[in-house]
Image (spheres, grey):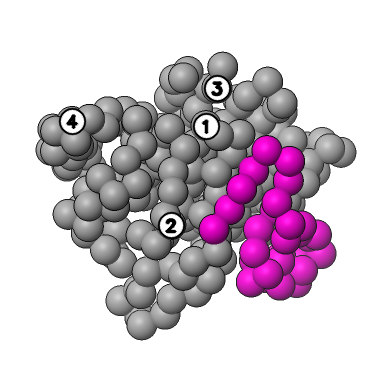
Amino acid sequence: MTTIQRLTDSCLTVTTDTGTTLFDPGFHTFDTGEFDLASLGDIQRVLITHEHGDHVKPEFVSWLLDRGDDVTVFSNQSVADLLAQHDIAVETANPDGVSSEDVLHETTPMGTAPPNRSFTIDGALTHPGDSYQPTRSAPVLALPLLIPWGSTTESMDFARRLAPQQAIPIHDFYLNGLGHNWITGMAKNVLAKSGIELIPLGWGESYTV
C-alpha cells in the first residue's frame, strides 16, 4: 500500500511499508504557508531532482533534518554542491528501493538546462523533476502540468510516451482555482483516451494506491 500526498507544487510525500520519502522541498511549500508544515509526519529520506529553488530550499532541508535524527538527503552532484555550502550532506547514490535516470532539465527561458535526476521510488511513483527526457515510469507519474520550460501539450505527449496507469499533476502553483480546474479537466480528458487516469490533488490532499 502506498499513500501519496501533495504538499504544494512539485513537493510530494510517498509513504510505503518502508517509510516516508519527501520529494523536492522547495520554497513554495516552505515560504507560502499554503501547507501546514506542523502536520507533516516523520520523514526518513528526502529526494531532490535538481537545484532550482522551487525544488530545493536549503532552509527547508535543514528544517527537515532538524526534526529527526534519521533523515538522509539524496540527489545529484549539483544539488550536493549547492547544499554543501549550507553544511548539508547529500548522498549521490540511490537508496534501497529507488532507481533514477540522470537527464537534463528542459531549457528554461533564461537559456539554462541544469542536471536533473528523475527518481522512481519502490516501484510506485516516478518524479521526473523538470524534464521530459526520462524513459520509464512507475505506475504513478508526477506530471508537470503548467511550466515555463515546456507546455501542457508537451506534458501530455510525455505522459503518453511513458504510459503510467495514473498521473498526478505537479508544477502548477501559478494557476488560480479556475485555471487549475480548467487545465486539469482538459488534461484528464486527453489522458483518459490513452488509458491514463489523472488524479488532481490540492495542497495537502492525498490518496492511497
Of the two numbered discs 3 and 4 on the same chain, state the one appearing first in sequence.
Answer: 3
Vertical order, 144 against 196 (above or below): below
**x, y percentage for residue 44?**
74, 35
From mark 2 to mark 1, how far is it between C-alphas? 16 Å
Under circle 4, the secondary element is: helix
Q: In the rendered view of the protein, which quadrant contains the N terminus?
A: top right
The residue that label 2 is drawn on is: 134
Of the two numbered discs 1 and 4 on the same chain, state the one appearing first in sequence.
Answer: 1
Q: Residue at x 46, y 70 (%)?
A: 104
Viewer-proximal residue among 196 and 6: 196
User: Is residue 28 visible from the viewing direction of this image?
Assistant: yes
The residue that label 4 is drawn on is: 192
Q: What crowding class fits label 2: few (fewer than 14 Cα within 10 Å), some (14-19), or many (20 or more)?
A: many
Q: Residue at x 36, y 37 (%)?
A: 164
Residues drawn in magenta:
74-101
Of the two numbered discs 3 and 1 on the same chain, state the one appearing first in sequence.
Answer: 3
The residue that label 1 is drawn on is: 124
From mark 3 to mark 1, how far is it between C-alphas? 7 Å
Task: Tell me if residue 89 is in the magenta stretch.
Answer: yes
Residue type, label 4: Ala
Viewer-proximal residue among 199 and 205: 199
Viewer-proximal residue among 127 and 146: 127
Under circle 3, the secondary element is: loop
User: Is the Cβ of the residue at disc 3 closer than 8 Å to that at disc 1?
Assistant: yes
